[in-house]
Image (tube, rainbow, N blue to C red):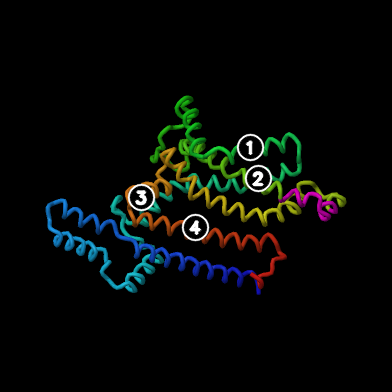
Amino acid sequence: MGLGWYITRRVGWAFIVTFIIVSITWALLAAAPNPEIAQAATQVALQGGDPADAQAAAERARELRGLDAPLYQRYIDYVTGVYTLDWGWSETRSQPVIQAILGALYYTAQYSIPWTLLVIIIGPMVGLYSSATQYSWKDHLATGFAFFGYAIPNFFFGIILLLIFGVELGWIPVIYNTGVPVFSLENARQLAVPVFVLVTGSIGGIMRVSRNESAAFMNADFVKTANAKGVSKLRIYARHVLRPTMVPLSTTMISQLLYLFVGSSLLVEIVFGIPGIGRLSYRAIIAQDTSVVLGFTLFFTFVATIANLLQDITYTVLDPRIDFDDR
């Protein structure tokens, strides 16, 4: 049984997991009261209508939203809509939910892609270098930077940098400009600080795990053998130390990037005024826009499922000893 069959099975499991999460989300929504129906009844009552009129308004609102249909029919319509990307209508934005999410994703991707690439490239390499120069001033400097990233909250660090470089020095714009081209110096200038803040907050944990894991291989027999055979240091670190280090490190990397993508990116977007996924979800929660809240919940569910799928595939590529039959 080869890698192709293993990937096929993992894709199938990812689909099943997604289906279960979607079903649980539907059950929670079906059990919760709909605020739009209550709002329709309240409006009639405030206009002097009697309880019968309020009840009739609530029934009309229920019919307009298809909530008077049988549960099984609503469930089938809901699941069909999820997998055909028909995620409903946003009352606060007056546009389809999928269109609102894609519009916000356009701005989130502009800083998330460079941030993710920098963390994946720099984190393991600095951790490996720190392990190779263990207990030197370079190791202490990298350790101090890692703990600084752990300790300081992203939103607070972002505000401090915005005050220094935006307000005092005027090097970056204080308000995010959505009108500049994506691939332009102006866009790179206004996204430099948000990317730096997110890299600082996420690279520390990856550096520490990379340092600790690679330190276990530095004095391994196969590394000593490679040194005795005259293999270059670069080849030893890249092929014999970094590769086995990446197997446990990939778990930390995926989970930490997902955590920051969901949590810290929201705070950074609010601080810097970026109209991305985090800011969209924040405003939807404040305005009780249920369709948008459900939409980004599904979006993060799909992102997490795909990330875990990539993590499982990475295991098998990095460590050939993993048996596909046992997984």
User: Which numbered dot is residue 145?
Assistant: 1
Q: Which residue is the site of mark 4?
A: 303
Which one is earlier in the sequence, the residue at label 1 or at label 3? 1
| CA–CA distance in space, label 4 to label 1 | 29 Å
Q: Which residue is the site of mark 2?
A: 207
Which one is earlier in the sequence, the residue at label 4 or at label 2? 2
Which one is earlier in the sequence, the residue at label 2 or at label 3? 2
* Residue 276 x, y percent position in the rendering: 42, 46
Element marked by disc 4: helix
Residues packed near mark 3 inside 10 Å, few (<14), some (14 to 19) or many (20 plus): many
| CA–CA distance in space, label 4 to label 2 | 24 Å
* Residue 67 x, y percent position in the rendering: 27, 66
Residue 140: quarter of image:
top right
In the rendered view, does 283 fall on the left or right side of 7? left
Q: Is residue 100 above or below residue 87?
A: above
Please provide the residue range marked out in magenta.
Answer: 213-225
Q: Residue furthest right?
A: 228
Q: Residue at 46% across / 64% down in the picture? A: 21
Q: Which residue is the site of mark 3?
A: 284
| Amino acid type, mark 2 | Met
| CA–CA distance in space, label 2 to label 3 | 35 Å
Badge 1 vs badge 2, beta-carbon distance below 8 Å: yes
Residues packed near mark 4 inside 10 Å, few (<14), some (14 to 19) or many (20 plus): some
Which one is earlier in the sequence, the residue at label 4 or at label 1? 1
In the rendered view, does 151 fall on the left or right side of 184? right
| CA–CA distance in space, label 1 to label 2 | 10 Å
| Amino acid type, mark 3 | Ala
Which one is earlier in the sequence, the residue at label 3 or at label 4? 3
* Residue 166 x, y percent position in the rendering: 46, 29
Q: Residue at 35% across / 50% down in the picture? A: 284
Does 224 lie within the magenta span? yes
